Amino acid sequence: MNGVFRDLLDKCVIIYLDDILIYCKTREQHLKDLEAVFQRLQQHRLITKGSKCEFLKQELEFLGHVISTEGIRIDSKKLRAIQEWKPPTNLPQLQSFLGFVNYVRRFIPNMAGLTGPLTDLLQKGTCYEWGEKQQAAFEALKKLLMSPPVLRIADPEWPFEVITDASDIAIGAVLMQDFGNGLQPIAYESRKMQSAERNYPVHDKEMLAIVHAFKIWRCYLTGADVTVRTDHKSLQYLRAQPNLNPRQIRWLDYLESNFTYKITYKKGANNIADALSRLSAQLAAVLVAQSNPLLIHDSNLSGHFGVDKTLKALQRFYYWPDMVADVQRYVAACPICQRMKSSHQRPTGLLQPLEPPQRPWQHVTMDFVTGLPAGPSGNDAVLVVVDRLTKMAHFAPCRTTITAEETARLFISTIVRLHGIPAAIISDRDPKFTSKFWQDTWARYGTRLQFSSAYHPQTDGQTERTNQTMEQLIRTNCPDRNKWEDVLPMLEFSYNNAPSATTNHSPFYLNYGMDPTVPISTNVEN
């Protein structure tokens, strides 16, 4: 299926096995996309079953989630079994429960804190003893799993905000965007600190939370404008500190070489991420009742209604923090209301060979090599563009923080100026290459954009191999790593003058019909 809809993937179509999700922003465009999908199905003699199809929906279930104009939430039908989940009596049962919990962790703002007493039992050499702490955490998680929040779908055209916090034993972060109506959550993240990390000073713990968030959400934050909000004021001035320890230098180097960001101070009392890292206070407030009669949702007089009616019935008599979340989780896990069915697999599909080009520079592949030492010009990355037919490559120095607009200008000055406009560009799913600006730019020229398979960048093997060769050339021909940019033009020439194992000719010869003049050929002629 991935091969059938290759050019539509992540533009208007998402494929999972034999499930097809078609999406867009307007009804008119949706009808056009439907027509394109139906034509593709007809061409390949694929049949759909009408009873399993839904059209023109603003909300639908897909892979255990409900996708709507509001965002993404967990499908309540998929959480039915959680309510009847018995306390684990051995390690395999605990691992099974935590595996289920981990599936929805991006929806839960304080997952690391709540699972702390449970994950402690997984440590090597620990005797499995189920006590009051574990029971309290288990019950709290069961309630929490009933009402995960609605997460907005990230839009790379809008700036991101990362709100972080750290406690003595855990770190947490929230990824958010403001779409014009206030900040909305995109994802939550939290984890327990390792034993060595718990010995860090406070400012290093807070910095650890920032670095961890950027690593987890790198696919969103690379190439985007990011504002980091922390309740540790001194981190605002970290870049200006003259004396940094080796750990701080490594962290700062990672952030500076991969992201465009600024750190601002947000008072702790108003920091939404505080909840992500607070373990003790949350568990101390858990009350394990001696009896728990089912009065509202499950009683004979309550009717097993949904979240809204159950919540309103409760609010007539009771109140507690996170009531909405608790009700949503409980209803979602009710064994009478729903049936459990979760998916943990990544989308996969058969790999299909790319269409062979008919002339040089008709089809090109492109990628970035990052993490190079910044030279005097500030460049710390290379844009690598390879002709799929002749294997000729161009290496263009740039910065890791290059935008989609700057990438387009660099591509035109480096490739289009010499070889014309390509018919197809193959790349990975970098936010710069999936942005609206990049797609609109090449749509005007009639260039087709193709993307390597999700979760498997090796499918664009030609560029990946060229990247490795270029990095090897820099290591072997540039003793001073900081001056790699000075020798890059000659390294490009060396690469293009070397015979390819695929064609048995050099890329230079296949492009120009002759070999270039080099010192050895001059000596032979003389």
Image: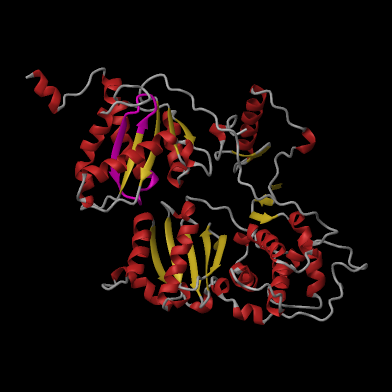
Image quarter (top left, top right, bottom left or bottom right) of the N terminus: top right
Residue 296 placed where, x, y %? 85, 71
Q: Residue at x 70, y 44 (%)?
A: 57
Q: Residue at x 63, y 37 (%)?
A: 30
**Residue nearer the viewer, 381 or 196:** 196
Q: Is residue 291 above or below residue 341?
A: below
Q: Is residue 479 above or below residue 264?
A: above
Quadrant housing residue 252: bottom left
Apparent side of residue 494 relative to residue 212 in the rendered image (left or right): left
- From this viewpoint, which residue is outermost toward the front? 125
Image quarter (top left, top right, bottom left or bottom right) of the C terminus: top left
Apparent side of residue 91 relative to residue 372 in the rendered image (left or right): right
Residue 158 appears anywhere in the view: no
Q: Is residue 456 above or below residue 70?
A: above
Residue 482 appears anywhere in the view: yes
**Residue nearer the viewer, 9 or 227:** 9
Magenta stretch bounds:
386-405
